[in-house]
Amino acid sequence: MHEQSIHKTYQYKLKPTSEQELLLDRVLMLCRHIYNAAIGERRDAYHLRGISVTYYQQKAELPGIKEAMPEYGAVHSQVLQDVVLQVDRAFQAFFRRVKAGEIPGYPRFHGRDRYNSLTYPQFGNGATLENGFLMLSKIGRIAVRRSRPLEGTPKTITISREADGWYVSISCADVPTHPREPTERETGIDLGLESFATLADGTMIHNPRCYRRAERTLKTAQRRVSRRKQGSNRRRKAVKLLAKAHQTVKRQRQDFQHKTALRLVQQYDAIYHEDLQTANMLKNHHLAKSIADVGWSQFLSILHAKAAWAGRRVVAVPPAYTSQTCSGCGVIVSKGLSVRWHSCPDCGTSLHRDHNAAKNIERLGQSLRGGVALAAS
Ligand SMILES: [Zn+2]
């Protein structure tokens, strides 16, 4: 039988000693200095001489830097190469957006609080796993809190500093999938502002209540930072608390999204959703929606990954008219965003607007597939 495999990233918490933490902090600082210097070099070359510096030129400068500044002996050379590669990516993205007619921000210098990860691009070269420990050249053997077993072939290792400590992300290729038994059920999913998501059978999935409490804490923390004097010790403490609050919100959101995606993947063989990128071009932007957008695309990427792993299908469909079309008879019933109920004057179908949209999304997905639709939910 042909085995399917996917890419997957595993994240584990690290338990470095305080000595190792100092070393990691130091390596991050050195990387950040190279990052900023590489940005500065490109800027100057462009503004003063009108030329652009390439990744290969900057990479070729690294051995010279190591020779001139012995402190860089503490940083693995592939990690440094990855830093200039990140600079290159930032510039590539910048130029892509300029070309597309947007007005992007120029790649920025990063301050201490904005530079928090380093990557070993080649597993086994400077970073490897041994008996459950992470082995980093020049830093040593770091204990890993292993929560779930790693599968597949490790490719890259990224170490990141978060508000509550250090983490390692190991991206793996050739991870075997774990196909689930078919349920013979499919659904459409409408992502909304009122409830997080609505399914084709009318189920509404709401954002958890803890969000609001966490957001209040976040606001208080933000105000505390802005009240305190710049450069003061008290402000530094407040910044730490703010970072923690941010992390709590992020964790809660991720946790909710993972649980929601898992439930959907357990219940349905196929899940259809609106293509968000096209949806963005169609709908007008307001702040609440653009914030929600981020959450939706994060959720969809989790859903796609879980589905691939479980042998399920998640399919994006074009969003045109999914909320205006009547799911009962197909007639267009125009309604503004504030109209939350769909009632069809033609066939009498009456249901929540998002429920109607989810049904349309499901049918659209099934028709695109061209095959026989499974039992509608
Ligand atoms: Zn109708």
Image (spheres, rainbow, N blue to C red):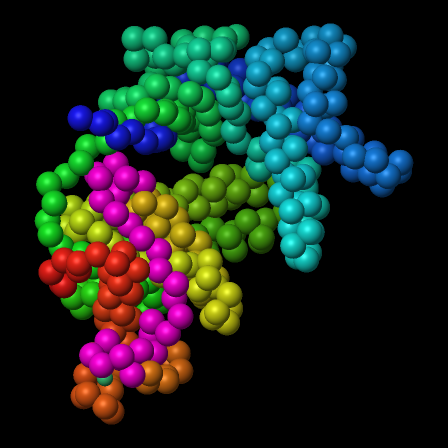
Q: Is residue 139 above or below residue 275?
A: above
Q: Is residue 216 above or below residue 263?
A: below
Residue nearest the viewer, comparing 202 with 16? 202
Residue farthest along the right direction in this orientation: 49
* Residue 49: percent from left, percent from top: 89, 36
Q: Is residue 229 left or right of residue 295?
A: right
307 falls in the magenta region: yes
322 falls in the magenta region: yes
Q: Is residue 207 left or right of residue 110?
A: left
Q: Which residue is found at the position 54% from the left and 22% from the top? A: 25
* Residue 40: percent from left, percent from top: 76, 33
In the rendered image, which quarter is residue 373 located in?
Answer: bottom left
In the rendered image, which quarter is residue 211 located in?
Answer: bottom left
Q: Which residue is found at the position 72% from the left and 17% from the top? A: 60
Q: Is residue 164 above or below residue 254?
A: above
Q: Is residue 316 left or right of residue 124?
A: left
* Residue 15: percent from left, percent from top: 37, 19
Q: Which residue is found at the position 44% from the left and 46% from the top? A: 246
Q: Is residue 117 left or right of residue 130?
A: right
Residue farthest along the bottom direction in this orientation: 345
In the image, the segment drawn in magenta is 305-331
Whether residue 205 can be seen here: no
